[in-house]
Amino acid sequence: MKYQSQKVAYYYFLAAIALFGIQVLGGLLAGWIYVSPNFLSELLPFNIIRMIHTNALIVWLLLGFFGAAYFLIPEESEREIYSVKLAYIQLIILLVGTLGAVGSYLVGIHGGREFLEQPLWVKFGILVAALIFLFNVSMTVLAGKKTAITNVLLMGLWLLSLLWIFAFINPDNLSLDKMYWWFVVHLWVEATWELVMAAILAFLLLKLTGVDREVVEKWLYVIVATALFSGILGTGHHFYWIGLPGYWQWIGSIFSTFEVIPFFLMMSFAFVMVWKGRKNHPNKAALLWSLGSSTVAFFGAGVWGFLHTLHGVNFYSHGTQITAAHGHLAFYGAYVALNLAVFTYAMPMLRGRMPYNQVLNMASFWLMTGGMAFMTFVLTFAGTIQTHMQRVVGDYYMEVQDALSVFYLMRFGAGAAVVIGALLFIYAMLVVRKDEVIAPGAASSVPGE
């Protein structure tokens, strides 16, 4: 670690890891309710558990992104963060907002819009935190060295924060309401977050493989161009279901087919960089997570997204378990695994230690990835049967759900594997053996600095 202000990232990562644990446990609880629908139905209804599960996911991923920015921007800009105090204030606001949102959900206070259920004061808190972050990192970059990685990262984070403004717009007209809703939900995960992912992945591969910066930057700009080209107009694959003009049916279908390209490029980029790399970096676990992230993202966001994005297919599959299969694998590959890669790479340096618990860390990767892959296949089969029974044959919804019970049981088993893997990862991140501690005064020799 070269700069003292990078230590800010450590506390962002700790908060993210804590929320990560809560999120996967909430998901496992929600999975069991699919098996036993009356479980906790009065004490903790399913819709509240689902809010906690999805909101914890979004917040811990954002905390990971913010922490990653505070870790890599000083190295890329070759200067300390503009204001460490502002970074801590931002973290406190986000944590208070998170606790406030969860407390509100538990007593039945929420906005009701899926993923944007936060009470109004929490939304304002998130906006203030985002503005503090943008000011802090922008001032850091403007005063220091500019690189393709910081340029792309800042573009993604600025757009991400500005799009949050649409979370405040909630018109009475349902079509307009859903349009603004998709401006946040789709343009976050299928446009701006992709830029953040590409920038962080580029930084990790630059450090882990030793490939020339010029090669990394060329790939990065191509990935960004394809992500924005496909992701923005690809929003149209939602628009033709919410009452917008019919031409969105074709725009959405055509541009959605291109959304697989940036994820294919990111996967190719990761493997080519490792193939061309000259550095035998000691942190093999971070490299595994980086390669795994780009690969699973290609299948989850790219292939599984493409499977049901064409309007002729989506007419039948929209809102079934096929959507859940795509969503779980896409989020896990593109954003969860990427954040875990950053934690794996940065935490040993932030704690002044050699890469530690790598075998356990890599075991957690295979447990989580295997569990998520099996869950995706189970939900895909369940969604296919659901589509036929419910949308083609016309069976009643609850009859169809009863027919899918065996798939929900298998999904719960897959979720249990993911949770065990997540707990193993948290242990590997936070517990260090004595033989993994660097001798006093040798912290500056940590590989990767």
Image: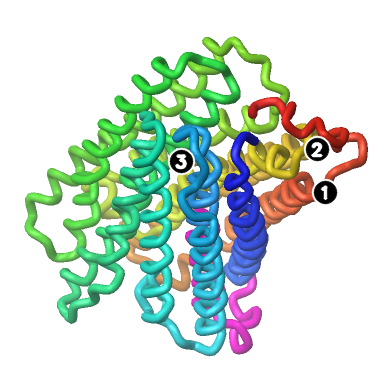
Q: Which span is picked out in magenta?
A: 36-61
Main secondary structure along the magenta-highlighted residues: helix
Q: CA distance from mark 1 to mark 3?
A: 31 Å
Residue 76, percent from left and from top: 47, 33
> Residue lying furthest right in this view?
434
Mark 2 Cα-neighbour bin, 10 Å: few <14, some 14–19, many ≥20 = many
**Residue 431 has which mark?**
1
Q: In the image, is residue 237 part of the stretch drawn in magenta?
A: no
Instruction: Identify the amino acid type marked 3.
Output: Gly
Question: Where, quadrant-wise, is the N terminus in this rendering?
Answer: top right
The residue at which mark 3 appears reads as 300
Q: CA distance from mark 2 to mark 3?
A: 28 Å
Say which residue appears at 19% left-offset and 74% top-offset.
174
Say which residue appears at 77% left-offset and 50% top-offset.
430
Q: Is residue 349 left or right of residue 268?
A: right
**Residue 329 visible in the picture:** no
Residue 333, percent from left and from top: 51, 41
